Amino acid sequence: MRSYNEAQFIGTFMTTSATPTVAAADLPVVQAGSFLTLHYRLAGPAGDVINTFNEKPATLSLGAGELSPAMEDKLIGVVEGTHTTFELAAGEAFGERNPEMMQWVARKLMNELGDPYEKYTAGDVVQFPTPDGLGSYAGAVVQVREDGAVLFDFNHPLAGQPVTFEVKLIGVL
């Protein structure tokens, strides 16, 4: 049996993988229009709002509106394989809170859009169809009146708050 002195291996890279080692300069870098596979976490002062680290990674296209422009800007120039965290100032990630995004919705409309027997309580998040019917958007219940009308907050939950944006960039195309 042949023995080796550990000094022989100082400064060398040993791997059991058949995949060739790629220099960081050869790895893809995020740019406008890139398709990304990543794990990410968005958190505000109260904790996580989204966290994919214990789930299937997310896939998205930069510039398609799947992330806020401020978060997309943070990703430009990031190298595939990077795991980093960005701190965004209050309002930077999702804008300031907009009082006009607080709206009362009549019970009659709620009945037409969903289950007429649904009971809404503060904190519930309700999905609404977009006018074209091709997508949806969410509103958080703030208050319910005796007549059944519901006050919704359509601001992003992190609007007006500092945001922690943690990213592990798995793939860049």
Image (cartoon, helix red, strand yellow):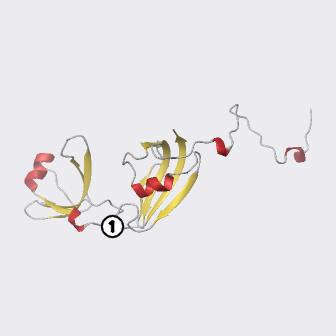
Q: Where is residue 39 in the image (x, y as percent from the top left)?
A: 49, 48
Q: Residues within 10 Å of mark 1 (few under 14, many from 20)?
A: some
Residue in the image at 49% along x and 64% along y: 87
Q: Residue at x 38, y 66 (%)?
A: 91
Quadrant of the rendered structure where residue 143 is? bottom left
Q: Is mark 1 on a helix, strand or loop?
A: loop
Q: Is residue 105 left or right of residue 56?
A: left
Q: With respect to residue 98, does 128 lie above or below?
A: above
Count of numbered badges drawn on the protein: 1
The residue at the point 61 percent across, 42 percent down is 27
Residue 135 image offset from top left, x and y in percent: 26, 43
Measured along the vertical axis of the image, is residue 112 above or below residue 163? above
Give the position of the N terminus as an image quadrant.
top right
Can residue 172 be seen here? The reply is: yes
Residue 115 in view in this figure: no
Where in the figure is residue 99, as x and y percent of width and height?
23, 68
110 relative position to 142: left or right: left
User: Which residue type does callout 1 highlight?
Assistant: Glu
Residue under label 1: 96
Q: Single out the residue that lies furthest toward the front.
A: 32
Q: Nearer the viewer, residue 145 or 58?
A: 58
Q: Nearer the viewer, residue 161 or 124?
A: 161
Q: Relative to 46, is 20 above or below?
A: above
Q: x and y percent of residue 98 in the render?
A: 26, 66
Q: Residue at x 91, y 44 (%)?
A: 5
- Of residue 102 and residue 146, the one placed in the foreground of this image is 102
In the rendered structure, the answer to whether residue 72 lies left or right of residue 132 reads: right
